[in-house]
Amino acid sequence: MAQFINAKENLVTEAIDGLLAAAGGALSRLDGYPHIKVVCRADWDKSRVALISGGGSGHEPAHAGFVGPGMLTAAVCGEVFASPSVDAVLAGILAVTGEAGCLLIVKNYTGDRLNFGLAAERARALGRKVEMVVVDDDIALPDLPQPRGVAGTLFVHKVAGAQAEQGKDLATVTAAAKQVIGKIVSIGMSLDTCTIPGSPKEERIAAGKAELGLGIHGEPGVQQVAFVDARSAVTMVTERLAPHLTGGTAVALVNNLGSTTPLEMSVLTHALTETGAIGHIIGPAAMMTSLDMHGFSISVLEADAAEQDALAAPVPMAAWPGLHQVVPVPVMPMPDGLTPIAPIASHNDRARGTIEKVADLLIAAEPKLNELDAKSGDGDTGATLATAARALKGGLDRMPLADLTQLFPALGNELSQTMGGSSGVILAIFFNATGDACANGASIHAALQEGLARVSEVGGAQVGDRTMIDALSPALTALPDGITAAAKAARQGADHTAHIHRAKAGRAAYVPEENLKGHNDPGAEAVALLFEGLAREMAEG
Amino acid sequence: MAQFINAKENLVTEAIDGLLAAAGGALSRLDGYPHIKVVCRADWDKSRVALISGGGSGHEPAHAGFVGPGMLTAAVCGEVFASPSVDAVLAGILAVTGEAGCLLIVKNYTGDRLNFGLAAERARALGRKVEMVVVDDDIALPDLPQPRGVAGTLFVHKVAGAQAEQGKDLATVTAAAKQVIGKIVSIGMSLDTCTIPGSPKEERIAAGKAELGLGIHGEPGVQQVAFVDARSAVTMVTERLAPHLTGGTAVALVNNLGSTTPLEMSVLTHALTETGAIGHIIGPAAMMTSLDMHGFSISVLEADAAEQDALAAPVPMAAWPGLHQVVPVPVMPMPDGLTPIAPIASHNDRARGTIEKVADLLIAAEPKLNELDAKSGDGDTGATLATAARALKGGLDRMPLADLTQLFPALGNELSQTMGGSSGVILAIFFNATGDACANGASIHAALQEGLARVSEVGGAQVGDRTMIDALSPALTALPDGITAAAKAARQGADHTAHIHRAKAGRAAYVPEENLKGHNDPGAEAVALLFEGLAREMAEG
């Protein structure tokens, strides 16, 4: 599977340099590439206890993303899924450890324990005060001899980090870390394996299955289970966690293992909070990933008051999502005004006559407009307009015919309901904006221009884009000179659309040029036929 | 492809409720489920201009994740990749708009334009002051009539949001939004299509190919290109962006389209910053996703000073990664002390004699230890120890034999180099810690106990775990009573390991119980043989 990397051997160093370049100078690294990859706080003055963590890469943002005030002082990065060397860890220790000493926070994997452990010995031999704690939060196997260190490690970084930031001494920080480690429990579930750069993907998890109790290095989960849905996934996970909890204030760290979408993570979070077992939450977010694994993990710490404070302390690193209390979903009542108040019907023979005439013209034009539309679309422009016209005629008794400021919006709402689709919404916008302008004191002509401007703004079409605007715009411009002038302008505009072979808006934008040549846009034609009909009517009347 | 969802029809509402439950009370929603899905600031008092955005779901954290002080007042959410209805947008407008009015920020997709546009008209008819801007930042096609709105929309949210937060009036906020929209350019690239919930995945992109110039709704990219590596991907993208830039201060928004790993995003960021074309960066982060698309997009805004300030203003939402200046990667010199200072060789016949005797004992034990190891491992314990022993004998002339505080660490370093693997590191830790204790004034016996304690701490093994500790620990405990007592205790401990069928640490933890029955752990046996040999030697000598 292709990935956005260059040479595999430079993957981790390039990624670290990308992180540093985008960190605005907050992060630095040791000059030890390629073997020694240590990311440090650039502002570090060694005045307090240093916190150092790390391990194999592939778990980003852990660990380098959590280097900063209030969390880690340095992260020692190995290659993907491989522990950093003793020399790399020692370099990290020597670079950031002052008189106050340092605490190494190590995930329980043999390589990490040994390399960090020996580096600690060497640093001690050089006179540094070094403590080391090992995080073993994974509860996948009830009596696993060496539980793995997984995402719960973040709890340790944050609690110890807050203590160190406050200037607590090494013994106090170490004791706080150990207290947290003694209480964290974590378990993960995944629907797919991860893709190790440069290796073919292992297709281990069959369709309909999920793996429960997995680590963060692509190793198989403790069991394969049938996957039903998000809720049952959360139930399986929380049932494994529950026996380890004692009823204290449960803080859940909801971790995206890699490629789970934010939508899925939020659905899982919803299922988790619905259980009622969680008091506070960190995430959902990608914190301790396993490359692109499509899975999640939940870690729980029953935090005392001091630990809650430490977890809640703000830090500037974007990778830390913060601690939030789980609250019942706050729901606001719907606002008034959504249901349009039915306008009070009123009589006006001239308005009724005009609308009836317009409707009849559109009904009569149905075959012609359908035929035109069939050349570049699905051939239903005539039918859509005729159906709307019939509905309009049938609804005239409900219309506020005597009040134009009410009549225009009412027409718009009627059209948007009967026509549906984009055309209905566009006409609704046209008539609503026209009515709005009337209500603000504009003349009918000016109000219609206002309506057109709004349609153009919302729909994104201008004159020349092969839409109904090509006829409507010149018609409205000419309207002060009379309906006959408007009709003539509309006809010219409509006929010109036959020469526009490149539609820039509306559905015709997706039609090949060849299909647009030599015939009018059906929307523009409808407008022209309307104005021509009205002009004839007035000449005759 | 399985996903962590429940019923598809509840996907978006459950995800929103998950987001809200984890937001600590900062977010609220309207009581309009399932059709009306509007997320609002819970603390909103309508005293300033409201900013409303939204559109189809599937782009999380956009848009609901950016609701909060300094960005959006409300997000109107449709179903996955489907515009919200006019009623939903109108409900959002009416819920949050006060005297100061509101600005709708709409991505340029027909459905969104029309539904937001008509809702704006309706709200105006109800007396609300409403402005609307349409973001069209996609430059995939040079002369696309209707460029799509994609991740650059975040620039508009942030700049307009900062202005609104400061209490600027609607005209000012709208003008600021329009100025930003006029300058943003965006383009994306992907290695794979996205998975629409409930639909089979479209396998459109062949191996070795990438799509360039894609939208965020799964539509095909403008062209398929050969994919080489991350650097060439960034080059293709920046070459498309360059003609649109005028040389101002370029702020790049580096967006993860879904399932690209943080490692890959950092590699891409590294390649981007290496071009030298970027002054500031937002991300890399998932901001405007397209479900689980394995791709990225880069949006660029040439920001003036006021826009830079607005982009840099802190906001509390975790989804916003902040703005950082692009800096040369800060590199710190490597610390001193990494290269162990070679100890000064010195003479001591007793120490030399003891080491030679121990080495000879281990060399003699090679076949027996190999044979034991073969029963539960790969049969090389004897060979590994014998090789190390030979190297040790060969290096005695370089050893600080007269100074125990130097000799112990020197032995440890020699063993870790010649043995390799876990055993070498463990012995190095043992001897380094022993030497450290000696240097601190401990007796040899106490120092050896200290070494054992450290090995136990780092390696995670206790007595009873079927390791060399089962022999070493009782031997050291008995040592004050003499070497013969120690040898007896070591033998008892080693022989007891034959009855430990469940290893809790070391490699044997992964061996089936059956294979452990009835024979000693080779590490413990080696210790017992050592002490027995030394005891014999002393009795004879």
Image (spheres, coloured by chain):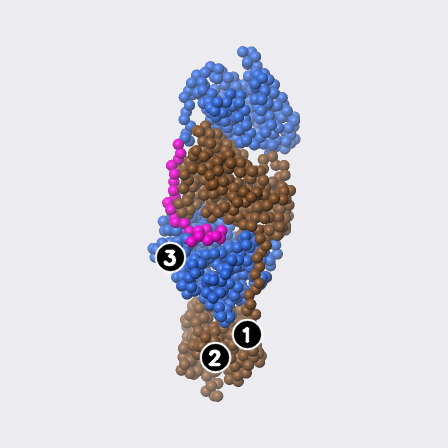
Chain colours: A brown, B blue
Which label was assigned to residue B224?
none
Q: Which residue is mark 3?
A: B306
Does dot 3 land on a helix, a strand or a loop? helix
Left-right relation of A225 to B168: right
The amino acid pointed to by label 1 is: Glu
Q: Disc 2 sits on a residue from what chain?
A: A
Q: CA distance from mark 2 to mark 1?
A: 22 Å
Report whether mark 3 lies on the same chain as mark 1.
Answer: no
Q: Identify which residue is drawn at 63% across, 23% down.
A: B495
> Outermost residue, bottom direction?
A541
Q: Nearer the viewer, mark 2 or mark 3?
A: 3
Give the image location of residue A201, x and y in percent: 53, 44
Does dot 1 land on a helix, a strand or a loop? helix
Q: Which residue is mark 2?
A: A529
Q: Which residues are magenta?
A: B313-336
**Neighbour class for label 2 at 10 Å: few (<14), some, many (≥20)?**
many
Give the image location of residue A221, x and y in percent: 59, 42
Say if residue A406 shows up in the picture.
yes
Give the image location of residue B220, x and y in percent: 48, 58
The amino acid pointed to by label 2 is: Leu
Q: Which residue is mark 1?
A: A414
Q: Identify which residue is drawn at 53% across, 21% down.
A: B445
- Out of A491 and B277, give the one closest to the viewer: B277
Question: Is residue B320 in the magenta section?
Answer: yes
